[in-house]
Amino acid sequence: MISVYVLPVLLILLLVYCVIRRVKVYDCFLLGAKEGLSLAGRVFPYIAAIFICIEAFKASGIAFAVAEFLKKPLSFLGVPSEIAELILLVPLSGNGTIALLEDIIAECGVDSYPARCAAVIAGASETVFYIAAVYFSKCKSKKLSYAIPVSLVCTFLGALAACALVKLM
């Protein structure tokens, strides 16, 4: 019940601190809102491009075909074949990952090995391309050719480690 009061207490403490330090709270708020809107304007083209590519990847059936192709090699590595498509979708779409997680849980059961692996992977990973789009839109350096491949490899290795840890527990 105490958690209900944490945010209001923090906001009041922040306002009291700002009054003591003679900070113009409203002016700072407006400046932050202005910077947020300009950031959204700069980031939007990158995010729109990523979302269009993700939807094309899913709608074309390529994601399903690649997942079908990867089922045997993944099962050899101890990854349940039911989560092959989830592993492909994790770097692309957080909402798509949650939707696939729901399907896996409905199909396999909550306490099944594939559902537990999928839950750990979905909960412990991030959408690589979305984060890259936001980061690259602000980054001055354009020599970032290894960032996405390394992130994808690490995401895949994280999925393998998640399945191994779930199997141990």
Image (cartoon, helix red, strand yellow):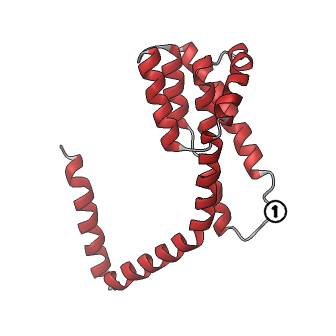
Residue in front for this viewpoint, 27 or 105:
105
- Image quadrant containing the N terminus: top left
Name the amino acid type tagged 1: Lys
Q: What residue lies at 58% left-to-right and 53% top-to-bottom?
A: 51
> Is 107 displayed left or right of 55 in the figure?
left
* SS for callout 1: loop
- From the top left corner, tell me how far across and down residue 73 is, in percent: 75, 18
Compared across the picture, whether 130 is left or right of 19 comes to: right
How far across and how far down the image is residue 155, in percent? 66, 37
Residue 105 lies, with reference to residue 155, above or below; the image says above
Above or below, 22 relative to 110: below
Residue at image x 60%, y 37%?
A: 89
Of 12 and 138, the residue lying toward us: 138
Residue 14 position in % (x across, y down): 30, 70
From the viewer's side, name the closer residue of 143 and 114. Answer: 114
For the point 54% across and 73% down, the residue is 41
Callout 1: few (<14), some (14-19), or many (20+) C-alpha neighbours within 10 Å? few
Q: Which residue is mark 1?
A: 143
- The answer to whether residue 89 is left or right of residue 12 is right
Callout count = 1
- Residue 62's spot in the image, x, y percent? 69, 36
Q: Is residue 31 above or below residue 64?
A: below
Image vertical order of residue 117 relative to residue 98, above or below = above
Farthest residue to the front: give it. 60
Question: In which image quadrant can residue 157 be found?
Answer: top right
Q: In the image, 139: left or right of 123?
A: right
Q: Residue at x 47, y 13 (%)?
A: 112
> Could you say which quadrant of the image residue 32 lies in?
bottom left
